[in-house]
């Protein structure tokens, strides 16, 4: 008697598995942009200026970037469950260390631990999407993952500002660490790498956990041998970098000084940029899948994003309504970068999808890693010595000069996408 083939996993189980990974990814975005609403408190408590604050925020990205290639390789060997659980545990420790820090050096170390820990979330989440959902949904799931992540960032906007005002930043960061600890336990108990571990059929037509006949470093070398890998890793740095440099640190003071907004209005607009970026992700993924093309949509989005940053930095002073429209359009255009993961996955052998996702994500995070401290360095270089309540004050002209870096990065992104090779939404390399 022939045994019946295992059924595909029920939708509820697939979404629960993926959703827990998405929750951890949300905490990563929360940590990524949290300093934006605590700039005055951090500068006053640790007695630092813009350059040191920029480096503090960038410590998250230093370890995040360094972890991307190892994460991609481990996602193809360890599996996402172990990566997510370990990441949540270390993230918890880093957040608590930051909350208890008595010096900027300890705060930097806490930030470094958090960045390296949450670095595993994106690649692991894409791996879960590939294992637990049909291949035709991959670009959509990438967009949805971005939406979940930015939802976490939005909680680090006005809601975090209110919590910090009520309880202080140390108490809020400590509570965040405890929440990550609970999440780590839940991930270990519930998440599984593949439906087969729950007795169901998987969505892959063959096992692809590791490339046959190649070591882990051999797989990385193979991925780096494709031109699209390099282009799709470097281009989104110029798209994501300005978004996270703006919303994660410098957008609020920029809007206050250059466009004359209140702190509350500025925080709301920074969150609006993230919201547009988040909501656009699934839409861009679906549009790309529907038209059966990756490159044209990606390139068009990069050009529009560059135009948006140019107007924001060098255009006339705008009111709240005009800024809301501009930032919404810029965020929506920038969300097209989520299609780059499907683009990259289709450009290398399927056995190496975790590795290529790690390489691309590493390239993406180079953007904010460089831009956040670079903007701070330019601001400090042009500082005239003015202080207000123990915090340095930077002029509107200084902010416009520093924001030229965002415009240049967005322009470079568009140029890098021109020589990419279209895959037609199909696996171009077997």
Image (cartoon, rainbow, N blue to C red):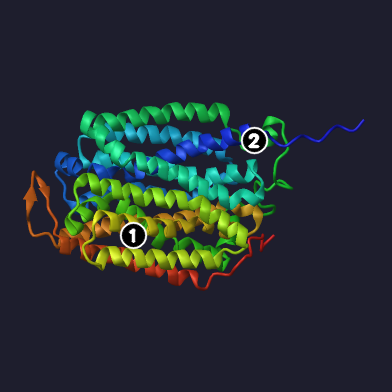
The location of residue 402, given as percent across then percent down, is 23, 63
Q: Is residue 393 left or right of residue 240?
A: left
- In the rendered image, which quarter contains the N terminus? top right
Number of marks drawn:
2
- Residue 339, position in %: x, y? 53, 57
Quadrant of the drawing holding the C terminus: bottom right
Locate residue 14 relative to residue 92 in the image: left or right: right
* Residue positioned most to the front: 321
In this rendering, is residue 84 above or below 369? above
Query: Residue at the spot x=53%, y=53% of the render?
Result: 357
Question: Which of the 4 image quadrants contains residue 390?
Answer: top left
What secondary structure is marked by label 1?
helix
Image coordinates for residue 31, horizontal then vertical, percent: 35, 41
Q: Residues within 10 Å of mark 1 (few under 14, many from 20)?
A: some
Q: Would you name the residue on which mark 1 appears?
A: 326
Q: Nearer the viewer, residue 369 or 387?
A: 387
- Residue drawn at the location 52% of the way across and 56% of the way down: 284
- Placement of 388 over or under 169, stated as above or below: below
First in sequence: mark 1 vs mark 2: 2
- The percent coordinates of residue 5 (x first, y second) are 81, 36
Q: Is residue 248 visible?
A: no
Mark 2, Cα crowd under 10 Å, few <14 / some 14-19 / many 20+, is: few
**SS type, badge 2:** helix
Residue at which label 2 appears: 11
């Amino acid at each position: 008697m022939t045994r019946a083939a295992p059924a595909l996993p029920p939708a509820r189980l697939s979404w629960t598995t993926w959703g827990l990974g998405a929750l951890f990814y949300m905490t990563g975005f929360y940590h990524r942009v949290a300093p934006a609403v605590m700039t005055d408190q951090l500068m006053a408590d640790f007695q630092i200026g813009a350059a040191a604050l920029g480096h503090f925020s960038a410590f998250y990205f230093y370890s995040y970037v360094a972890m991307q290639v190892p994460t991609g390789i481990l996602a193809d060997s360890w599996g996402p469950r172990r990566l997510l659980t370990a990441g949540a545990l270390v993230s918890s420790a880093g957040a608590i260390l930051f909350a208890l820090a008595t010096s900027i050096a300890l705060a930097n170390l806490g930030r470094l631990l958090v960045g390296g820990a949450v670095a595993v979330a994106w690649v692991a989440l894409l791996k879960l999407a590939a294992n637990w959902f049909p291949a035709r949904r991959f670009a959509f799931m990438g967009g949805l993952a971005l939406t979940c992540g930015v939802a976490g960032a939005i909680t680090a906007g006005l809601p975090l500002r209110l919590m910090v005002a009520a309880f202080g930043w140390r108490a809020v960061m400590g509570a965040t660490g405890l929440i990550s600890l609970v999440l780590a336990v839940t991930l270990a108990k519930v998440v599984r790498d593949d439906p087969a571990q729950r007795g169901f059929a998987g969505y892959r037509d063959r096992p692809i956990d590791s490339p046959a006949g190649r070591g882990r470093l051999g797989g990385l070398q193979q991925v780096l041998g494709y031109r699209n890998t390099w282009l799709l890793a470097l281009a989104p740095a110029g798209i994501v970098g300005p978004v996270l440099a703006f919303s994660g640190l410098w957008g609020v003071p920029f809007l206050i000084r250059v466009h004359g907004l209140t702190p509350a209005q500025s925080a709301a607009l920074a969150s609006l940029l993230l919201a547009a970026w988040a909501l656009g992700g699934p839409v861009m993924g679906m549009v790309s899948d529907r038209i059966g093309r990756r490159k044209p949509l990606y390139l068009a989005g990069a050009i529009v994003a560059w135009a948006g940053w140019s107007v924001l930095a060098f255009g006339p002073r705008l009111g709240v309504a005009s800024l809301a429209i501009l930032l919404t359009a810029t965020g929506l255009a920038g969300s097209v970068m989520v299609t780059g993961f499907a683009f990259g996955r289709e450009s290398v052998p399927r056995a190496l999808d975790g590795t290529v996702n790690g390489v691309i994500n590493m390239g993406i995070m180079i953007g904010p890693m460089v831009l956040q401290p670079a903007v701070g360095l330019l601001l400090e270089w042009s500082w005239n010595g003015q202080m207000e309540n123990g915090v340095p004050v930077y002029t509107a002209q200084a902010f416009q000069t520093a924001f030229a870096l965002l415009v240049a990065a967005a322009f470079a992104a568009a140029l890098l996408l021109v020589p990419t090779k279209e895959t037609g939404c199909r696996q171009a390399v077997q």
